[in-house]
Amino acid sequence: MAKEIAAPLAGRVFQLKIKAGDTVEADEEILVIEAMKMETPVFVPWDGTIRDVMVKEGDQVAEDDILAIIDEE
Amino acid sequence: MRPYFEEMTQFGCALKKGRIKGTEENFNSIKKIEKDVADEVNRVKLAGFPEEKINARGQMTVWQRLEYLVDPGTWCPLHTLYNPMNNVEGTTNVIDGVGKISGKWAVIIGFDNKVMAGAWLPGQSENILRVTDLSKRLNIPLVWLVNCSGAKLTEQEKFYANRRGAGTPFFRHAELEQLGIPVLAGIYGTNPAGGGYQSISPTILFAHKDCNIAVGGVGIVSGMAPKGEFNLEAAEEIIEKAKQFRAKPPGSVNIHHDETGFFRYVFEDETDVLDGLKDYMKDMPAYHPKFYRVAEPKEPRFSIDDLYRLIPLNPKRVYDFDEVLSRLVDSSEHMEFRPDYGPEVYAGLCKIDGFLVACIGNRQEYLGRNYPEYADYPAMGGKLYRQGLIKMNEFVTFCGRDRIPIVWLQDSSGLDVGDAAEKAELLGLAQGLVYSIQQTDIPMMLLLLRKGTASAHYLMGGPTANRHNAFTLGTVASEIYVMHGETAAVATYSRRLVKEKEAGRPLEPIIEKMNKLAKDYHEKSRPLFCAKNGLIDEIVPLCDLRKYLVAFTGAAYQNPKSICPQHHMILPRIIKG
């Protein structure tokens, strides 16, 4: 089942660690958002496969923007 | 109060495979730096003569004495790397920490007899005063292993006199005795002058047969009556007197056991002295833990090694504070105080080794778009805002009322700033927290997980709260500074930049200075710098943190100066509602 990963806060995509087709494991860090001088990692809650990545490094994102879609295993 | 404390709310989650995979680098980096710190500690242990040489003289080293004296597994060293005056010896020449002797917690300190036969060195009295303060704060005995050859005479101007000089510990010993806190001393070797007072100022003296204590030793007795200069005749006279006194130094056990009776006991073997101390420690005033335990001691539900994956070495990286705490407290259980208020601050009751403790820490994450309520900008954890300060004031006040020791877990970049923050009364609430802490008179300790910055380092139970703070522990991720180095560079040079720009002069020289200042800040905030200068009392490997929490809590409850019956406590009721 496809599930969306949303931005927990507004900021700049500082590091992107995934691409479409990657398999990920529960609690794996998929990207980092930089905001307010701090780096907030975003973790994927489930095992799965990355279906789509909606952002690239350097993008500004708003809170709750969709960052990636994952097919949960 | 069994329904409150026997089983509290569980918190924390087991690490999942994705997190474990993604934190290998952090895990290995922390382990590597901890190894570097351990190498520094080892350098202190190896200072002076080698162990074999001391043993060949029929003596044990201070480290061997400590190992024999302290109950296995309980030693929590402090101030190992403390060397604020940058002594070439690499140490203040006293070794100290908290440990159990015969099942009772004590503060323990000994002269390093490998280094100049345990001489006074610069910075040593500051070290000793930290130790006497600790004994006073925790109301537990101070145990000395005296073996002090007196002052390093070539540097006496750095430590002999002054308000906190080498004689101040003698007054502190007297102060502890006034407070009913015994100071025991095992005495070895030659202890003239300052060493004599180190020996005589404790409460009960346990002497080794070969020790001596004296107002003045061989060097002084043979060199008294100054003549204005030295010449050949004077030198011959000194040689003769020195030979005479070396054969029979003043203040041996014949004098101070048989004649004065200063030594309550004299022992044949070095280990017998330590056995004497152990025997007395059995009878030290101490409540059985059952008096104050609120539940059976239990280990956390998760491995403490998880901390190597949960605490990022990168100071900009946010993490989940609650997960960290769950690795440190009994059963990973707690009762959180006002979880819906002041979200940047964790405050809650936890158990350590079955004893009730209060924990206060900085949550790190983004705090949601509606926080802080007084401003139109978003808030990030690590900073303190109005609600968090109010929450800490309330919690600390209740802890004082209920006589619950506090463990602060600090990782803060400071307070919110700007006019909105001023209107929200942050300055007054911050000093209000200082007042609240001062009101409590309960033992506190600080674990500096990462950042100790700006006034938050003071407010959150830092070492500046030195009537309350028993000790401050750092990790290899700790850093302490008034502000980040780059912030300081901007604060220092921003006007100068404007001036140079307006004058049409090149900016590069100022930029160079700014970079230098930022670099200096970085170097002077590292854990080793902090430990050497006493900003923290020890750098502790993450895997040993709980051991120190157990020592602090056990010591705080061993013989507390005031108590609150569990069924009279108000804080658990307030949390329950």
Image: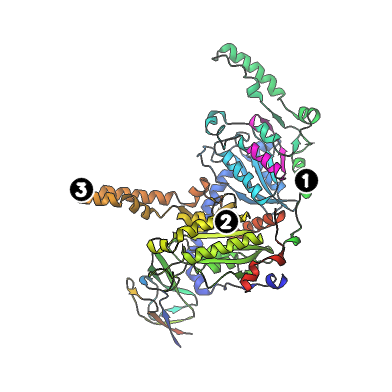
Closer to the observer: label 3 or label 2?
Answer: 2
Mark 2 or mark 3, which is nearer the start of the sequence? Answer: 2
Viewer-nearest residue: B22 or B385 = B385
Q: Quadrant of the N terminus of chain B?
A: bottom right
Label 1 and label 2: CA atoms lie apart by: 35 Å
Q: Earlier in the sequence, mark 1 or mark 3?
A: 1
Q: Residue B86 location, x and y as percent?
A: 50, 39
Q: Secondary structure at mark 3?
A: loop
The circle on residue B280 is 1
Number of marks drawn: 3
Counting residues from the start of the chain, the first of labels 1 and 2 encountered is: 1
Span colored in magenta: B169-194
Mark 1 and mark 2 residues within 8 Å of each other at the beta carbon: no
Residue B379 lies, with reference to residue B38, above or below; the image says: below
Up/down of B377 relative to B518, above or below: below
Closer to us: B190 or B437 = B437
Q: In the image, what residue type sits under mark 2? A: Ile
Chain letter for the residue marked with disc 3 in the picture: B
Q: Amino acid at mark 3?
A: Arg
Residue B207: where, in percent of width, then height?
75, 36
Quarter of the view holding residue B244: top right
Q: Chain of mark 1?
A: B
Q: Give the Cα separation between the discs numbered 3 and 2.
A: 51 Å
Instruction: Give the residue number, with chain letter if any, for mark 2.
Output: B437
